[in-house]
Amino acid sequence: MESEKIKIKLAKVFDPKLEYEGSGLSKEQEITILEFLYENDTYFAESLNNSDMMLIAKNIKDDFPIFSGNLSIFFEYKKEIEALKSHVKEAENEIKNILEERQVFKEKNEELNQAVESLQEIESNYYDLTKDQQEKINSITKEIIKLKLKNGEELLQEEKELLINSL
């Protein structure tokens, strides 16, 4: 079945009704053969993509060398281009990973800054609380000193220091 299709396709290429240019094939016949090779499971089809095939056909129609233009560079540097594409993909993935890590770092840094702010606030509140408590202790101690002095009792060393520091 497949061989019949091939025979029919090739018969169209070599149709005696078509004019030959010299002893070779016409441009249309060459393009038809190339399209046939491109459309079937051939090495030719594996080596080219659609834009390459279109460029070859255009080159034939325009009487340019078949591999002129970007196509010759494509064949010459295909492996290098694929390797570069692979490196670009790897670099894009690395950049993506770095950006993701950077975002995680940024989020962790923000969390750390919030924790530091919270600790500073707690420390400030503790200092205020300690200061308030110390003032209350000093006030009570002063009252005790007054009572001791009224009653003629002897003052403790701490009480004497408090009196001296409050002068």
Image (cartoon, rainbow, N blue to C red):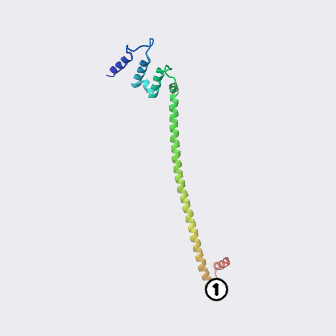
Q: Residues within 10 Å of mark 1 (few under 14, many from 20)?
A: few
Of residues 161 and 113, the one drawn nearer to the viewer in this rendering: 113
| Residue at point 52%, 56% (across, down) | 111
| Residue at point 54%, 54% (across, down) | 109
Pick out the residue farthest to the bottom.
Answer: 151
> Which of the image's four quarters has the C terminus?
bottom right
Residue 57 is situated, as x and y percent measured from the top left of the image, at 45, 23
Of residues 142 and 51, the one drawn nearer to the viewer in this rendering: 51
The residue carrying mark 1 is 149
Residue 95 is situated, as x and y percent measured from the top left of the image, at 53, 42
| Residue at point 58%, 70% (across, down) | 128
Image: 147 above or below 44:
below
Residue 115 is situated, as x and y percent measured from the top left of the image, at 54, 59
Residue 124 is situated, as x and y percent measured from the top left of the image, at 58, 66
Of residues 165 and 160, the one drawn nearer to the viewer in this rendering: 165
Residue 38 in sight here: yes
Task: Tell me: 153 left or right of 13.
Answer: right
Image: 149 above or below 161:
below
Q: Amino acid at mark 1?
A: Leu
> Which of the image's four quarters has the N terminus?
top left
Image: 120 above or below 93:
below
| Residue at point 54%, 52% (across, down) | 106
Pick out the residue farthest to the left.
Answer: 1
Image: 72 above or below 83:
above
Q: Quadrant of residue 49?
A: top left
Residue 49 in sight here: no
Q: Secondary structure at mark 1?
A: helix
